[in-house]
């Protein structure tokens, strides 16, 4: 892994210690720029994806979803231009053989050892694979470098099998693969990652800027919903010479990472480039016919594109906090939004060697667990259990003690304020529901 700064180091260490994210293939010495999500990480990531899917698909009438393949016909990548264009210029250090993207270098010496660099050469960003048992005779194809193309090639299918009408969008969440030259910074840039993308189809006569701006607004709304403050975001309007040739406008939504400001998500107006190309290469008609206006056209597209893993990282970086307590102790707390926290509640018996208390606590645990994702813990003392839950961002801890056996109330402790109150067991469901 590349050098990480102090706050990234702390975050990486927490995510490993608590089972959010592990380095890939660790027992075999690791595989650069690959990571595995652990038990807590998979919950957090699923919650982040679910909020996106609900906001952009389920709560809207004009967007439907698909789940397309990772391996598509190689013709897709010819048509989309990826085979010819999805290449990054690369320079290599003649001494230490480390490789760099020239656009990320600040001089013409190797940033790692000061050695001399080679001239630029082009390097394909796509992972190749072959279909068929004999490699030499197989069909050469690729792992998709973006989810978008699976949407474009299903445009006619979705149109003829559902009741959508322009303007409408097709959304997808799924894996993408890029043979990145510059890697590092933890899950910011990896060779395998997930994307949440929408292709929103509009008429060429539509006011595209209005649609573009409304997606920009919704992306900022989504950021707040998962706990990424808009104050830490910056809309970078990409100048024409840096945009893909088919893009009329691109905004990179950048985040203030612990290692500096860089892209979190992108929003682009891709014109009708992709559908036109697929129509040409597949020789299929991709025209849309509008019954009302009698217009016939190849739709234009606005594309909001969000990396899941970068969202996870921004959520974690935004939530991470260290706090000095009155007794001089320090605590680490992940101030995650309750909606995306892996566990909403943790239930403890005050003492693990008191069967009455443990029995009651198990009853309460099973009751709460049927409504909210709940963690059971009877290890160590209460103080240690609180610290553990603070580090994994659980909003509420609930303790069953001697008083519970008399009055059917429990102690509920708030992660952020650390305040404790007594709540009746019969009222727990409503109490949590109104706060989670
Ligand atoms: P960058 O400039 O950082 O390489 P990009 O402009 O190539 O990113 P897009 O092609 O616009 O990225 O992909 C859309 C989104 O997918 C990005 O905004 C980012 O969130 C995510 N993404 C792209 N590449 C990676 C990667 N290698 N690792 C993790 N996420 C990625």
Image (cartoon, rainbow, N blue to C red):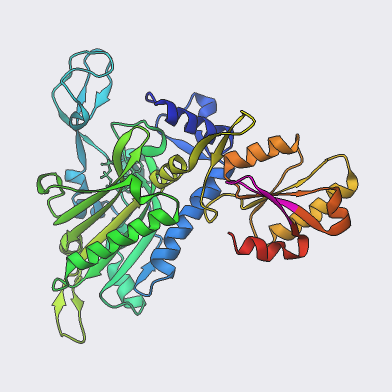
Residue 109 position in % (x across, y down): 18, 17
Ligand 1 quadrant assignment: top left
Q: Quadrant of the N terminus?
A: top left
Q: Quadrant of the C terminus?
A: bottom right
Q: Is residue 208 above or below residue 338?
A: below
Viewer-closest of 424 and 117: 424
Residue visible at 51% across and 25% down? 28
Residue visible at 39% across and 26% down? 5
* Residue 369 image-quadrant placement: bottom right
173 sits left or right of 238 in the view: right
Q: Is residue 21 above or below residue 152?
A: above
Q: Is residue 237 above or below residue 159?
A: above
Residue visible at 71% across and 36% down? 383
Residue visible at 83% across and 41% down? 351
Residue 13 in sight from this viewpoint: yes
Count of residue discs:
0
Q: Is residue 421 found inside the magenta-colored segment of the image? A: yes
97 sits left or right of 372 in the view: left
Viewer-closest of 48 and 404: 404
Residue 400 position in % (x across, y down): 79, 50
Residue 266 position in % (x across, y down): 27, 51
425 sits left or right of 27 in the view: right
* Residue 367 image-quadrant placement: bottom right
Instruction: Please give the range of residues in magenta.
Output: 411-422
């Amino acid at each position: 892994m590349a050098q990480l700064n102090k706050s990234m180091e702390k975050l990486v260490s927490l995510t490993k210690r608590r089972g959010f994210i592990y380095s890939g293939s660790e027992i075999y010495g690791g595989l650069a720029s690959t990571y595995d999500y652990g038990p807590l990480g998979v919950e957090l990531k699923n919650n982040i994806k679910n909020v996106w899917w609900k906001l952009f698909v389920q709560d809207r009438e004009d967007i439907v979803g698909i789940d397309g393949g990772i391996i598509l016909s190689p013709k897709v990548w010819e048509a989309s231009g990826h085979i010819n264009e999805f290449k990054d210029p690369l320079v290599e250090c003649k001494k230490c053989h480390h490789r760099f993207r020239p656009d990320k270098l600040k001089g013409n010496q190797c940033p790692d050892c000061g050695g001399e660099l080679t001239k630029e050469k082009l390097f394909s960003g796509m992972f190749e694979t072959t279909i068929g048992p004999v490699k030499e005779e197989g069909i050469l194809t690729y792992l998709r470098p973006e989810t978008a193309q699976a949407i474009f090639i299903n445009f006619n299918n979705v149109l003829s099998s559902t009741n959508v009408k322009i303007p409408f969008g097709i959304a997808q969440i799924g894996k993408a693969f890029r043979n990145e030259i510059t890697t590092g910074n933890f899950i910011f840039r990896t060779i395998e990652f997930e994307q949440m993308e929408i292709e929103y189809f509009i008429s060429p006569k539509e006011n595209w800027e209005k649609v573009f701006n409304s997606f920009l607004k919704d992306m900022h709304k989504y950021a707040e919903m998962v706990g990424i403050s808009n104050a830490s975001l910056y809309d970078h309007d990409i100048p024409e010479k840096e945009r893909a040739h088919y893009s009329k406008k691109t905004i990179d939504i950048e985040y203030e990472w612990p290692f500096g400001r860089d892209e979190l998500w992108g929003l682009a107006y891709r014109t009708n480039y992709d559908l036109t190309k697929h129509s040409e290469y597949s020789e299929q008609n991709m025209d849309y016919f509008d019954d009302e206006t009698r217009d016939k056209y190849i739709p234009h597209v606005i594309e909001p594109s969000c990396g899941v893993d970068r969202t996870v990282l921004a959520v974690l970086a935004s939530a991470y906090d260290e706090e000095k307590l009155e007794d001089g102790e320090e605590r680490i707390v992940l101030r995650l939004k309750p909606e995306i926290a892996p566990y909403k509640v943790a239930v403890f018996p005050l003492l693990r060697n008191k069967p009455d208390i443990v029995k009651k606590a198990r009853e309460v645990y099973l009751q709460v667990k049927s409504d909210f994702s709940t963690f059971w813990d009877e290890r160590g003392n209460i103080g240690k259990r609180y610290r553990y839950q603070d580090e994994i961002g659980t909003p509420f801890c609930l303790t069953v003690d001697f008083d519970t056996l008399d009055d059917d109330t429990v102690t509920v402790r708030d992660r952020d304020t650390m305040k404790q109150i007594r709540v009746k067991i019969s009222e727990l469901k409503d109490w949590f529901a109104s706060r989670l």
